Image (spheres, helix red, strand yellow):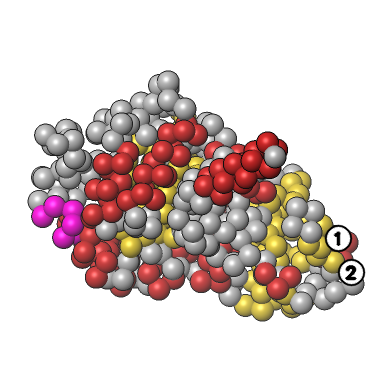
Amino acid sequence: MKNKILVVIAIFFFTAVKAQKFEGLALTPPMGWNSWNTFQTNISDNLVRGIADEMVSSGMKDAGYTYLVLDDGWMAMERDANGNLVPDPKKFPNGMKVLIDYVHSKGLKFGLYNCAGTKTCAGYPGTRGYEYQDARFYASLGIDYLKFDWCNTEGINAKEAYATMSKALKAAGRPIVFSLCEWGDNKPWLWAENVGELWRTTGDISAKFDGYLDHGTWKQLGVMPIADMQNGLRKYAGPGHWNDPDMLEVGNGMTVNEDRTHFSLWCMLAAPLIAGNDLRKMSKETKEILTNKEVIAIDQDNAGMEGYKYKSEDSLEIYIKPLSNDDWAVCFVNRSDKPMQVNFNWKDELIKDTLFKKTMDAKNHTYKIRNLWAKNNAGDTQKPLSAMLPSHDVIMLKLSK
Ligand code: GLA
């Protein structure tokens, strides 16, 4: 009898914990735009309207970018007398609600940022102790996405702090995608599946291909080291709960080849695609990268199976991603500073993805090949791949039977 009661209690708690977050959000990796990578705290009503307009007119919205997210710097330095957060009256003279309504009127969704600590990373009021009040405020504004950071959290337990905010959002009643941003410090992939829809896996990204930028007390990572750090995490991701290797730096200073590689890898990794460039001044090349629908379709594949580094030889890295319908994405990356000859005989490679129990067997099956950047049909796997790959560039292919 006692055992039965214990089982009932355990099931009750398991269901309660599992049902914590809103069901059915972010079934494919979230796509959108965030202000931080280009504007830091220099944000305004005017900027948001300009970006919203551009998301529509540039084709970004049509390509799937839905969430317009304001990062750190949107608040006044103090809460009001009732403890409510206050949008900065200089940056947002019309308040937030009118602006959010404007973004919604464009068919887009809107997101805001705050932090689990006492202050945000840029020193604005944090949420510690105000979780339920802030969640009600966000719901009343009609936001759709909350990025929740991890500065000024000394002595706070990450798992508990993020669970509290998740519960607060649920209690406020408006479905809001919850983006955990504690930089992978507390291994959120082990505990956040039912807390939020995405969790950062690393420190901050920079518009740098390899290596990192050293700021003394902290390091900003390049694209390739961040990709390396995803190793071993794919088993934790899936529809509704994604590893987040940070926002995109496409269009922020790397070469076109490097931007193409960055974007391809994020798609291979089923990463959230949150653009971080100034859409109002985007070059033709940047736009072509960000809106390549066939590449985006690899990221957004319904099965939500994160890809992985299959091989790495002499700076040639090969990423593989299983797709629905037993299709595959294959991405060849030249990490070196020189052009490289790529030879790959499909028939010699029996690729077994043991995690998702998928096998790519080009010896016994012929796969048709689509080149996703060249946007052409590129024969089939009967013939070995032989191509010159420029430095820091990719060949990204989709294989189907
Ligand atoms: C942290 C986050 C960044 C950004 C800034 C804002 O560094 O990781 O993505 O939100 O804070 O201050």
> Residue 129: horizontal and vertical position, in percent?
31, 31
Q: Nearer the viewer, residue 291 or 323?
A: 323
Q: Quadrant of the C terminus?
A: bottom right
- Residue toward you, 197 or 290: 197
Which labelled disc corresponds to residue 363? 2
Q: Main secondary structure of the magenta part?
A: helix
In the rendered image, residue 286 lying in the magenta stretch gets the answer: no
Residue 126 is left or right of residue 28, and the answer is left
Quick check: 17 above or below 45?
Answer: above
Q: Kindly check if marks 1 and 2 are in contact, taking CB atoms under 8 A apart as contact.
A: yes
Q: Could you say which disc has been placed on residue 350 in the image?
A: 1
Amino acid found under the numbered disc labelled 1: Leu
Q: Residue at x 42, y 49 (%)?
A: 178
Helix, strand or loop for disc 2:
loop
For the point 18% across and 57% down, the residue is 97
Coordinates of residue 387 in the picture (x, y in percent): 71, 64
Percent position of residue 297, x then y: 56, 69
What is the quadrant of residue 305 in the picture?
Answer: bottom right
Between residues 159 and 371, which one lies in front from this camera angle?
Answer: 159
x 60%, y 56%: residue:
238
Amino acid type at mark 2: Lys
Magenta region: 94-99
In the rendered view, would you say 262 is above or below 75? Answer: below
Give above or below for 265 relative to 314.
below
* Position of 359 relative to 44 (above/below): below
Q: Magenta stretch containing residue 96, yes or no?
A: yes
